[in-house]
Amino acid sequence: MNGSNKNVIEKTIIVEHLSKNFEVIEKKPGLIGSISSLITPTKKTIRALKEISFTIMKGELVGFIGPNGAGKTTTLKILSGLLYPTAGFIQILGYDPWKRDPAFLKQISLVMGQKNQLWWDLPAIDSLELNRAIYEIPDHTYKESLTELVELLEVKKLLYTPVRKLSLGQRMRLELIAALIHRPKVLFLDEPTIGLDVIAQQKVRDFIFDYNRRFQATIMLTSHNMDDLMDLAKRVIVLDKGQILFDGNLKELINQFAKEKIIKVLLSKEADIKKLDEIGKVKKFEFPSATLSIPREVAAVAASEILQNFPVADMTIEEEPIEEIIRRVFKGEK
Amino acid sequence: MSKYLQVFKISFQQEFAYRLNFVMWRVRNVIQIFLVFYLWDAVFANPDRVVFGYDREKILTYVFGLLTVKALVLSARAMDIAGEISRGELSNYLLKPLNYFNYWITRDISSKALNLSFAIVETLILVIILKPPFFIQSNLLAILGFLVTISLAVFLFSLLLFIVSSLTFWMPEAGWGIHFLVTVVIVEFLSGALFPLDILPGSLQNALYFTPFPYLIFFPLQVYLGNIGGLEFIKGLSISVFWVVFLWFSMKAIWQKGLKEYQAYGR
């Protein structure tokens, strides 16, 4: 009994056969379409999530990837208690999110890259004070968290400026503070680096990595930014059309989906590129270097063929870049 | 409790963020009072004139009382709720250990407190300038009754607003139209905000007294004027308490259902 209880606690997020349907009213184009949909609305059920299941352990940082409309954001919204699930079982930190128990809400946070909670006309510090009261954070904990977060995200000078006068990057960092001031144990991040410049992206990424390690926080992250995923997530869940395509190590994903190897050749003399094309797909040719992509199984054979038939100065065999693989997963290629 | 105190404070700050806006709003109110005063003053230029049983002094008091009570009851920040639902901004609140209804009630009270304190100063100045023949209630019991009924009215209107706004869960586009119909047209018409309800035919009045609307404006005002006392007061009070309780539980039920429909739009 004791053992199984502990097991439940270690598994911070449990999702079993989760489904979510949306009903939408379809409208034909134009004015006549508007009128006819007013009189006889045609309802259509969209199955946003189809029986997905996964578990996430305490302290894990999981990347959630998939094309637009795959159901990533819907999942995060259900997990944080915003949406009512159509079917399935969900337990987070031992709570049912939909019931929105205050004790549960105090331990989670959802950050959406394009949603803001800071009061637009007031300095961020006022919104933070409000959150201190709402989350009932003791004074010394609040001060400690605030100092720490402000330092990590380098926003000390921005706290007292009305939010509307800040740039997007500055605002996003302050939004992060507002979302984390109560030190949530579970963090849902939906596109946290959207719209940020490269430097700000890196700052936010470093911070997420740090937060995860320092507080043993469980983090689920969706992003279209490959760097976010490669820097942060060891484990990824690939979602498409409401179904999980892959759940596991980022490296395994590569093994499973990488079908080609990249051979880079440095030629010592001019050679006929057409002959190279017979061996494999030439992706780039700019004398003296050529880049070919070759199916994994025949990569070794192709390499020796090149060595035999061409004046090779240097040659390397590499894995496909990870972005390429994930892009293919997005496109739904198997 | 301290969380709502903080909500109160930040709302106050928010009102001051647009100082000029606030000043213009107060100027508008003062001009409105001038207009209304001179309009009715002209209608009742002949001091012996009586319309619908109202003479000059009574109608002026009713009209001025109306402006004050309307400002207190019908002005509500919570008008934004329908928008917050359809734009998906409700999500921000749902994620926090905070009661959304209490949050808006607090914001309303904060906004009303600010406006009221300004209104008192303005009224004092206007009374000195215009020297209107006002009826000042001196009966403490009537004043107490007025305070109780006005508090109930504030609560009642917030509940109505919440219920009407929650229709947005089912009809994100239609929300505003229904809102306008219910809170502006029906409420203004039936609450006595446009004309004293006692000019209506008796049977209609009797029926109206069983709805929540007269208790928003007309009833508190009549209590202040001393026109309603004793048994009639108890009866009115009981009906409005009934409506508060009934609407409270309806609001809870509707809101619970609505949240299941909520789609957290906006990404």
Image (cartoon, coloured by chain):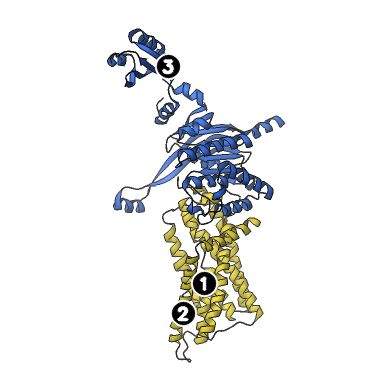
Chain colours: A blue, B yellow
Q: Quadrant of residue B251?
A: bottom right
Chain of the residue that carries numbered disc 3 in the rendered image: A
List x then y, in percent, for residue A289: 35, 19
Query: Which residue position holds label 3?
Result: A317
Q: Nearer the viewer, mark 2 or mark 3?
A: 3
Disc 1 secondary structure class:
helix
Residue type for callout 2: Phe
The picture quadrant where one finds residue B12 is bottom right
Farthest residue to the top: give it. Answer: A308
Label 1 belongs to which residue? Answer: B70
Whether labels 1 and 2 belong to a single chain: the reply is: yes
* Residue ID for mark 2: B34
The residues tagged by marks 1 and 3 sit, at their Cα atoms, a distance apart of 79 Å
Q: Which chain contains the residue that carries disc 2?
A: B
Q: Position of residue B28 (x, y in %)?
A: 46, 72
Q: Is residue A225 visible?
A: yes
Structural distance between the alpha carbons of marks 2 and 3:
87 Å
Dot 1 or dot 2, earlier in sequence: 2
Q: Residue at x 63, y 36 (%)?
A: A214
Q: Image quadrant for the N terminus of chain A?
A: top right
Q: Mark 3 and mark 1 in contact (Cβ < 8 Å)?
A: no
Instruction: Pick whichever, A77 or B257, lies toward us.
Output: A77
Q: Which residue is at a point 49% across and 61% down the rendered structure image?
A: B79
The numbered disc on residue A219 is none
Up/down of A232 relative to B29, above or below? above
